[in-house]
Amino acid sequence: MTQEEIKKILPHRDNMLLVDEAELCEDEKDEQGQPTKCRGSYTITGEEWFLKGHFPGNPVVPGVVLCEMMAQTCCVLLASKSENAGKITPYFTSLDKVKFRNKVLPGDKLEIECKLLKVREPFYFAQGKGYVGGKLCVSGEFSFACIKD
């Protein structure tokens, strides 16, 4: 999916839409035959609002923004599930076991993998990992409440 296609299923918009492209992975499916894994990416241009003060002269993508990038990639997966057909709004409900291993800098392309672990409607539990050049930079587990609009 392109960013324009992602805008059709996620409520995030400019300055907060932090996924450039995404794809559902057909190699892992649940018992209903729906994908449980998604890959996405975001290229840090250096012009992002969150880099202006973090840190001047030595910009580094803030950890909370890396978590948001993983979450948005996962939400592409959640929005594609048949029980969420139509419009949903995913709300973060928890972050757990988050680890930052390497810096993400302007010019880097963050490659994200997210996997759905379990569902207890309306809650969805997932894990995510973000890589730059094959090197793990961030990982964590998170959950969402998916509310139908």
Image (cartoon, rainbow, N blue to C red):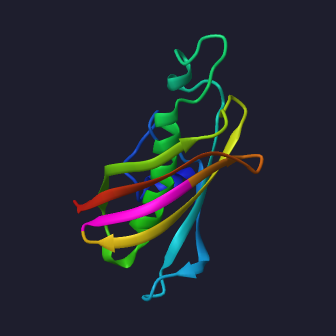
Was residue 22 drawn as part of the magenta stretch in this picture? no
User: With respect to residue 35, does 141 lie above or below?
Assistant: above
The residue lying furthest to the top in this view is: 57
Name which residue lies at 46% across and 35% down: 64
Image coordinates of residue 146 in percent, x first then y, are: 28, 61
Image coordinates of residue 30 in percent, x first then y, are: 47, 83
Name which residue lies at 41% across and 59% down: 9
Looking at the image, residue 76 sits to the left or right of residue 91; the answer is: right
Toward which corner of the image does residue 48 lie, by quadrant? top right
Q: Main secondary structure of the magenta part?
A: strand
Name which residue lies at 34% across and 72% down: 119
Image coordinates of residue 113 in percent, x first then y, are: 59, 59
**Quadrant in which the N terminus is drawn:** bottom right
Q: Which range is magenta?
A: 122-128
**Quadrant in which the C terminus is drawn:** bottom left
Along the line of sight, which residue is nearer the eye, 68 or 20? Answer: 68
